[in-house]
Image (cartoon, rainbow, N blue to C red):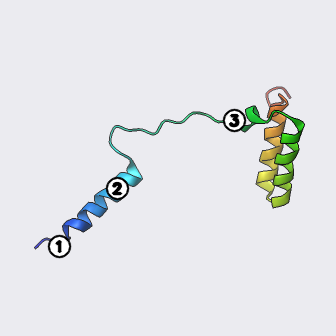
Amino acid sequence: MPPFSVTAVMMYEWAERQTKGWPGMALKTKPFDTAKYLDSAEDHAELLADAMATGHKGYIIAALGTIARAYGMSSETA
């Protein structure tokens, strides 16, 4: 009798596929910029209010950066 059951081997192989992906099937993603979808001052205010409500510094900084990009500002123009 083998040291591992067939079910254990199948579970191991399944876990390997989940962590490494299926052979030949690379995950393709596209860049997503939230700033493109902030159309109005109300959208900007809502994003900033949500960030401030959490009190998370990283979220607040990211929200400010997103709003700046929505206005067309970037670090390249500074």
Density class for disc 1 (Cα within 10 Å; few <14, some 14-19, many ≥20) is few
**Which residue is labeled 1 in the image?**
3
Q: Residue furthest top?
A: 77
Side of 55 relative to 37 (left or right): right
* Among the two numbered marks 3 and 2 on one chain, the one whose residue lies closer to the N terminus: 2
In this rendering, the answer to whether 76 lies above or below 38 is: above
In this rendering, the answer to whether 75 lies above or below 52 is: above
Q: Secondary structure at mark 3?
A: loop
| Pair 3/2: label in front | 3
Density class for disc 2 (Cα within 10 Å; few <14, some 14-19, many ≥20) is few
Q: Residue at x 85, y 41 (%)?
A: 44
**Which residue is labeled 2 in the image?**
16
**Which residue is labeled 3 in the image?**
33
Instruction: Name the quadrant containing residue 39.
Output: top right
Task: Name the spot of residue 52 as percent of width and height, x first.
Answer: 86, 55
Task: Name the spot of residue 34 as percent of width and height, x first.
Answer: 72, 38
Amino acid found under the numbered disc labelled 3: Asp
Task: Measure how far apart labels 1 and 3 are at the Cα level.
Answer: 51 Å
Task: Name the spot of residue 47 as percent of width and height, x first.
Answer: 82, 47
* Among the two numbered marks 1 and 3 on one chain, the one whose residue lies closer to the N terminus: 1
